[in-house]
């Protein structure tokens, strides 16, 4: 019997790799990316690194005037030995206030946590786009538009409360599409929890989360023919956040005699004056760049043939304006509208269907990238903060 040739060292490896690839189950719309957890965490770390370095450099320069510093100062003034109704009102929003009070390191620690959160969130965004089979060009352009501008760096490292609320809102938006359009029930519960935690993290989330939940019925529904499906979906999305807010409002009313307390105690005061400021702001050069992201979100909605997305982006934009006029937008906030509109675009873009559509989306993405830098360079808040750093 003739002897068989002995396999070389490379053959078993090649055969094993080919067998593993051949037997790998096809990727679905809900698979994690990258598939292996160590690679996912490595990618999150790489995404976080620029923001961590930025946070450390800013702290080393001695800049101490930021929304994070304001949040820490407010948290340190709270008496944590109490547990009465007034105390419950003072700590609102509780999630960010508790972190600011008990995480050692003050504002720098919040900056580091925000930077790490940014890395995790950016990996999740890439995962969402891979799941929807976005072309690589679209993924790169949208990621650069969102994360590669000073507005994102500033919010990630200097405005932890608003930034974390926006991140949770962005994750909730992606699950809204999965729940409403794909019919994924698990995503319905997740979006409700994301929105609830967002509301308990940032007072501004009170308005834009409500706007997103109200506008959800205008998305294309999987169960479009069923009576009451749209109202039921909106209720599932909004119920956790609404129940948490109503509970806090009832307790504040019973113990304090008013429904608002803590960071929301200034709501409805000076409404007329703030409205005048808004009208004057949108006639300025800086105000035009704040409106521009809304226009780009409209363009994407037209390109992907989702007219309901126009209503959603408009309603969320109006919610931010309402939040400012109500006094819910914290001092030092900037770039919230740009980040939110970019997240809306990413969340609402469906799977790529044609080369022409991909090219048009990429062009709008480049436009959004330019908008982000223009908004950052004309932002008064960012200019004052940068001047403080240079002065320090």
Image (tube, rainbow, N blue to C red):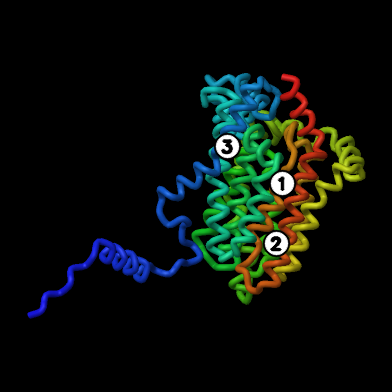
* Of the pair 81 and 333, the residue shown nearer to us: 333
User: Which quadrant holds residue 315?
Assistant: bottom right
Labels 2 and 1: the sequence-earlier one: 1
- Identify the residue position indicated by label 2 in the image: 362
**Closer to the camera in the image, 197 or 248:** 197
Give 253 or 308, whichever is nearer the viewer. 308
Mark 2, Cα crowd under 10 Å, few <14 / some 14-19 / many 20+, is many
Q: Residue at x 46, y 57 (%)?
A: 32
Q: Is residue 234 visible?
A: no
The residue depicted at 73 percent of the width and 51 percent of the height is 369
Q: Residue at the bottom extreme?
A: 1
Q: Is residue 51 left or right of residue 284?
A: left
Q: Residues within 10 Å of mark 3 (few under 14, many from 20)?
A: many
Q: Position of residue 239 (x, y in %)?
A: 59, 52
* Callout 3 secondary element: helix
Give me the C-alpha separation between circle 2 and circle 1: 30 Å
Horizontal and vertical percent position of residue 146: 67, 49
Residue underneath mark 3: 115
């Amino acid at each position: 019997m003739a002897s068989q040739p002995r396999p070389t060292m490379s053959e078993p490896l090649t055969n094993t790799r080919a067998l593993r690839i051949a037997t790998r189950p096809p990727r679905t719309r809900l698979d994690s990316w990258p598939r292996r957890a160590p690679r996912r965490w490595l990618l999150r770390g790489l995404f976080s690194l620029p923001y961590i370095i930025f946070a450390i450099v800013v702290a080393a320069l001695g800049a101490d005037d930021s929304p994070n510093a304001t949040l820490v100062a407010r948290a340190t003034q709270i008496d944590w030995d109490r547990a009465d109704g007034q105390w419950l009102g003072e700590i609102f929003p509780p999630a960010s206030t508790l972190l600011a009070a008990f995480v050692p390191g003050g504002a720098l620690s919040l900056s580091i946590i925000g930077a790490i959160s940014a890395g995790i969130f950016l990996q999740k965004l890439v995962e969402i786009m891979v799941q929807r089979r976005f072309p690589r060009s679209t993924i790169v352009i949208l990621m650069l538009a969102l994360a590669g501008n000073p507005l994102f760096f500033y919010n990630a490292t200097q405005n932890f409360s608003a930034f974390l609320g926006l991140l949770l809102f962005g994750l909730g938006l992606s699950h809204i599409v999965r729940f409403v359009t794909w019919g994924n029930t698990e995503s319905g519960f997740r979006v409700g929890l994301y929105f609830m935690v967002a509301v308990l993290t940032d007072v501004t989330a009170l308005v834009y989360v409500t706007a997103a939940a109200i506008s959800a019925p205008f998305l294309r529904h999987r169960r479009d023919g069923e009576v009451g499906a749209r109202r039921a979906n909106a209720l599932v999305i909004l119920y956790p956040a609404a129940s948490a807010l109503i509970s806090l409002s009832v307790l504040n009313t019973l113990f304090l005699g008013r429904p608002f307390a803590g960071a929301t105690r200034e709501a409805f005061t000076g409404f007329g004056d703030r409205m005048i400021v808004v009208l004057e702001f949108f006639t300025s050069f800086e105000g035009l760049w704040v409106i521009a992201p809304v226009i780009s979100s409209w363009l994407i909605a037209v390109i992907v043939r989702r007219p309901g997305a126009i209503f959603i982006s408009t309603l969320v934009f109006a919610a931010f304006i309402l939040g400012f006029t109500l006094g819910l937008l914290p001092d030092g906030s900037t770039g919230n509208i740009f980040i939110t509109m970019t997240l809306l675009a990413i969340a609402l873009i469906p799977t790529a269907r044609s080369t022409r559509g991909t090219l048009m989306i990429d062009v709008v993405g480049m436009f959004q990238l330019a908008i982000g830098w223009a908004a950052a360079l004309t932002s008064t808040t960012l200019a004052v903060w940068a001047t403080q750093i240079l002065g320090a």
